[in-house]
Amino acid sequence: MASSMNALGLAPGEKGLAANGTSYSQSLGQTYTKDGNTWRVVKAAGTLATMGRALVVSAMSGGLPTFVATTSTTANDFTWVGVCHSTQVDLAIGDYFLVQCGGYAEIISAAAIAANVAVGCSTTAKKGDDATISLGGIVGYSTESAAGVDENVGIVMITK
């Protein structure tokens, strides 16, 4: 169950510095509810820049997510863990940040997206699409359409 209190003091879009990892590491993977949306603590796998509304995926170990996050270029990637806030600051390797994993959000379109269809990771890093999405890769359902690439598209996320 998600907690409504974020003990780290992180807000969506901010970062916790890798230098303070001892304090943050115990919260890795935990979820929090803020303003009706669910957020999860993840750690940057590498330098991540211009991440506003970006879809991120987790490394896996033994079939389970490590919550060490990066972007994906795999369509229908089932290892997705969330969407960055629109104001996400740039991240260095090891920085901690929050990704949205439930509620209403916006993603960046990789191509045209129809309204009221399943969306997931595309073959373009950070972006979402409705092409070849199957059960495991569903991030959410579009609440509007996108005419083409690089549009901010409203979705309702499945909670993961």
Image (tube, rainbow, N blue to C red):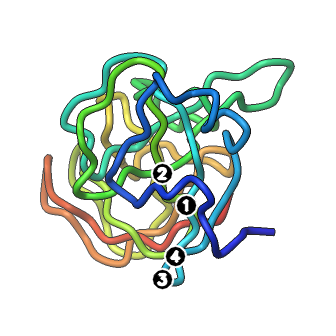
Looking at the picture, does residue 7 appear above or below residue 126?
Answer: below
Whether pointer 4 and pointer 3 mark residues with C-beta atoms closer than 8 Å, the reply is yes
**Type of residue at label 3?**
Asp
Q: Which residue is mark 2?
A: 99
**Type of residue at label 4?**
Lys
Q: Nearer the viewer, residue 82 or 44?
A: 44
Q: CA distance from mark 4 to mark 2?
A: 12 Å
Whether pointer 1 and pointer 2 mark residues with C-beta atoms closer than 8 Å, the reply is yes
Looking at the picture, does residue 96 appear above or below residue 133?
Answer: above
Q: Earlier in the sequence, mark 2 or mark 3?
A: 3
Quarter of the rendering occupied by the N terminus: bottom right
Residue 77, image x, y percentages: 55, 34
Q: Earlier in the sequence, mark 4 or mark 2?
A: 4
Q: Nearer the viewer, mark 4 or mark 2?
A: 4
Residue 130, image x, y percentages: 40, 52
Label ID, residue 81: none
Q: Earlier in the sequence, mark 1 or mark 2?
A: 1
Using a 10 Å C-alpha cutoff, classify the residue at mark 1 as few (fewer than 14 neighbours), some (14 to 19) or many (20 or more).
many
Residue in the image at 53% along x and 67% along y: 157
Q: Which residue, as the protein is rendered here, is positioned at the far right? A: 62
Q: CA distance from mark 1 to mark 4?
A: 7 Å
Residue in the image at 31% along x and 66% along y: 114
Q: Which residue is mark 1?
A: 39
**Type of residue at label 2?**
Val
Label 1 element class: strand
Whether pointer 4 and pointer 2 mark residues with C-beta atoms closer than 8 Å, the reply is no
Q: CA distance from mark 3 to mark 1?
A: 10 Å
Q: Which residue is mark 4?
A: 34
Q: Which residue is mark 3?
A: 35
Q: Which residue, as the protein is rendered here, is positioned at the far bottom? A: 36
